[in-house]
Amino acid sequence: MAKILVVGSMNMDIVTQVERHPVPGETIHGNETRFFIGGKGANQAVAASRSGASVAMAGGLGTDSFGADIRKQLAEDGIDLDYVSEQPAMTGIAVITIDQTGENNIILSAGANGKYGEDEVDTLDLTGFDVILLQNEIAQAVNQRVLEKAAMAHIPVFLNPAPITGFDHTQLNNVSFLILNEVEAEELSGIRIDGISEALQAGKQMLEAGLPHLIITLGSKGSLYLDQAGTQIETPAFSVDAVDTTAAGDTFIGAFVAKYIGGTPLNESLRYATAASALAVSAAGAQSSIPSEDKVHEFLQRVELIN
């Protein structure tokens, strides 16, 4: 069983369904508003736990009711919360609109996520963890300190540089495995990506900078894996009716890391993560849409029977 430490964000997502996204200055009517537990760090932790990994979460929560709700849900998913600290701020919030096609717009308010600092990182005991998962929803200085501690402990770091705005490119020097979508890959490579061929070009450029492993997710076009050994794997997406894409990428990452670090072969881990992501977009909410290991295997069995 993989032992994973996720250092990252935890949010309460306020999700409103809309016919279409508003343009600047426009007021539109929403169809329905619901509350879901999210945050890229927490989403990836839940995805990894539901895919069979042993997971610990590190980050900041407020002392408000949202923080209590998040703690309760993560604990119910079997996630170790010893490194989750209470901060003198409101729990992080994501305001999300989702249109009829399932595409989303997201506004983040960091809250307690932004208060989690280097002092808390220095209390982390990395002993016993196989891998660390990072994203870009907490302070850059915190991520940098985690990367430094991981390097000293010889623990690989899987990084998802999302959201890409404000990402410190120098952090890539200490990353073992980069997982990002086409928008983030475009930002880092400067190459516009419309499909696998452009993703391959962008990926090779990023590998030239020294990255050991790389996955670029491409939504309905699947994903591309590349590494320094010259391995290239294209994994096609599964066709599903999209309801909400909010946690699709986080589900892919958490599920992939759980399987890959747990000893599942690379090809199978990529296919499993792709199936988990497909199930996630088929349901509403962030963590509420993340499937269990059993559900993913059932889905893959149905796909194999059809084919």
Image (cartoon, rainbow, N blue to C red):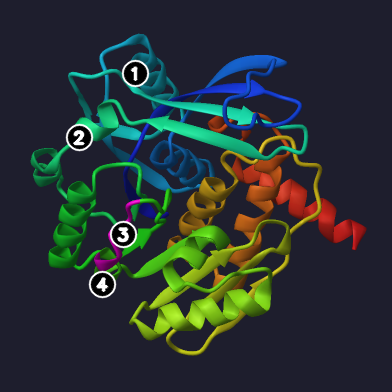
Q: Secondary structure at mark 1?
A: helix
> What residue does disc 2 label?
116
User: Picture quarter containing residue 199?
Assistant: bottom right
**Amino acid on which disc 2 is placed:** Tyr
As displayed, is residue 197 above or below residue 168? below
Residue 149 at what x, y percent from top left? Answer: 14, 58
Q: Quadrant of the C terminus?
A: bottom right
Residue at (57%, 62%) from the top-left corner? 182
4 and 2 marks in contact (CB < 8 Å): no
> What residue does disc 1 label?
67
Q: Mark 1 or mark 3, which is nearer to you? A: 1
**Amino acid on which disc 3 is placed:** Asp
Q: Earlier in the sequence, mark 1 or mark 4?
A: 1
Few, some or many residues within 10 Å of mark 4 (<14, 14–19, 20+): few
Q: Give the magenta part as a residue range.
A: 166-170
Instruction: Tell me how far mark 4 sits from mark 3, CA to CA.
Output: 19 Å
> What residue does disc 4 label?
173
Q: Secondary structure at mark 3?
A: loop
Q: Earlier in the sequence, mark 1 or mark 3?
A: 1
Whether residue 180 appears in magenta in the rendering, the answer is: no
Q: Mark 1 or mark 4, which is nearer to you? A: 4
Q: Earlier in the sequence, mark 1 or mark 2?
A: 1
Residue 283: give its label. none
**Amino acid on which disc 1 is placed:** Gly
Q: Secondary structure at mark 2?
A: loop
> What residue does disc 3 label?
130
Instruction: Tell me how far mark 1 sits from mark 4, CA to CA.
Output: 34 Å
Few, some or many residues within 10 Å of mark 3 (<14, 14–19, 20+): some
Residue 3, visible in the rendered structure? yes
Instruction: Tell me how far mark 1 sits from mark 2, CA to CA.
Output: 14 Å
